[in-house]
Image (tube, grey):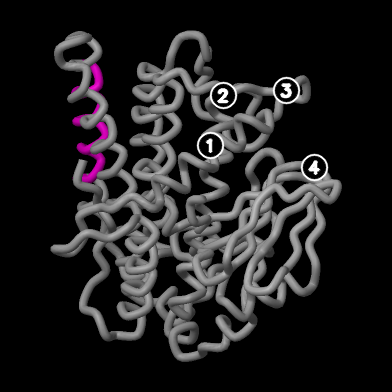
Amino acid sequence: MPIITNLVIDEYGAFLGKHSGRLRVTKNREKLAEAPLMHLQQVLVTGEGVGISADAIGACCKAGVPLYFLDPRGRPYAALYSAGLTGTVLTRREQLLAYNDRRGLDLALAFARGKITNQAGFLAYAAKYRQETDPELHRELRWCADEVRDRLDDIRGLSGDTVDQARSQILAIEARAARKYWGALGLLAPETYGWPGRTGRGAQDPLNAALNYGYGILYGQVERALVLAGLDPYGGFVHTDRPGKPSLVCDLIEEFRQVVVDRTIVGMANKGTPLELDDQRLLTERSRRAIADRVLARLDASERYERKRLSLTGVIQSQARHIATFVRGDRAAYEPFVARW
């Protein structure tokens, strides 16, 4: 049997318990899955009506295995990990102080550069594979990629001393890039899906629902990386403070949406993997399982990074550490992750 590194629990009525050095998922006394804790990287609970024993939670915390909970739309609503992971102080102090000086602005600009560069990179990547089969679409995608990339000049032209002085301009530039990007992504979607444009919360179409679900999985990876790096997930820079809003997660995730989720979901749609909604306009259990499997596999895939190859999960962790060392003054600059498309 293959070793389970990412345990996904998505069946109504399933129960997660601990047996020796393993986590076991059962339903009506039937064993659905079993994973040794020594190999496990995370537990992802995406189904409703799932029960978990206190012993299983304790074992995960001792082994450093986080548990993430997503609702049927892919919105994260809870995460469990060892309380000791939040015990660092120095990095968090510097993170909060950085908001009011040039460090905060530098981070905000870097996040925006990473997001826009990867948006353009994904469109150029998609165009490359259509040069022979659909030259007209190839040209359109290349043109859109260039239009998105042009927004980098706008980002470079911004000035100021704090992120508050430039936030509205950063968000406006990102919005212009996003309109072009999502319009181009619609050209890649099979016509049968009837792409309505990008919709976040409450999406009523399969593609947007799939993207949102994938982002929910990615969200957990980013939050864990920030916590392990000693950072406060709620102390962001581009995204404003709001009670209960993990602003720094929302900042860092922008560097990885296109690389991890957009590429995966568009690929699934074009390769005929069913992305289906039920009568409540929620993804079916089969679709949720397929998305989780593909996104987690993508996170395990290796990327060229800093003259070596790392899994994308490792890249996310490294980027979080770079934020921490930058705000502490141990790193001269923070550079966003840009994929080698």
Q: 64 or 5: nearer the eye?
A: 5
Residue at the image position 57 percent from the left and 48 percent from the top: 216
Residue 30's x, y, as percent?
A: 79, 47
What separation in Å lies between label 3 and label 4 (alpha carbons)?
15 Å
- Residue that badge 3 annotates: 278
Name the secondary structure under disc 4: loop
Which mark is in front, 2 or 4?
A: 4
Q: Which mark is residue 123?
A: none
Secondary structure of the residue carrying tag 3 is loop
Q: Secondary structure at mark 2?
A: loop
Ranked by sequence position, the earlier of labels 3 and 4 is 4
Which residue is labeled 2 in the image? 275
306 up-or-down from 145: above or below: below
The image shows a total of numbered marks equal to 4
* In-image side of 40 versus 142 (left or right): right
Q: Between label 1 and label 4, give the one nearer the viewer.
A: 4
Question: Residue 278 location, x and y as percent?
Answer: 72, 22
The CA span between labels 1 and 4 is 18 Å
Sequence-earlier tag: 2 or 4: 4
* Label annotation for residue 291: 1
Residue type, mark 2 in image: Leu
The residue range painted magenta reads 140-153
Nearer the N terminus, badge 1 or badge 3?
A: 3
Examine the rendered structure and indicate whether residue 141 appears above or below residue 122: above
Numbered disc 1: secondary structure: helix
Label pair 2/1, CB-CB below 8 angstroms? yes
On residue 12, the disc is 4
Q: Earlier in the sequence, mark 1 or mark 4?
A: 4
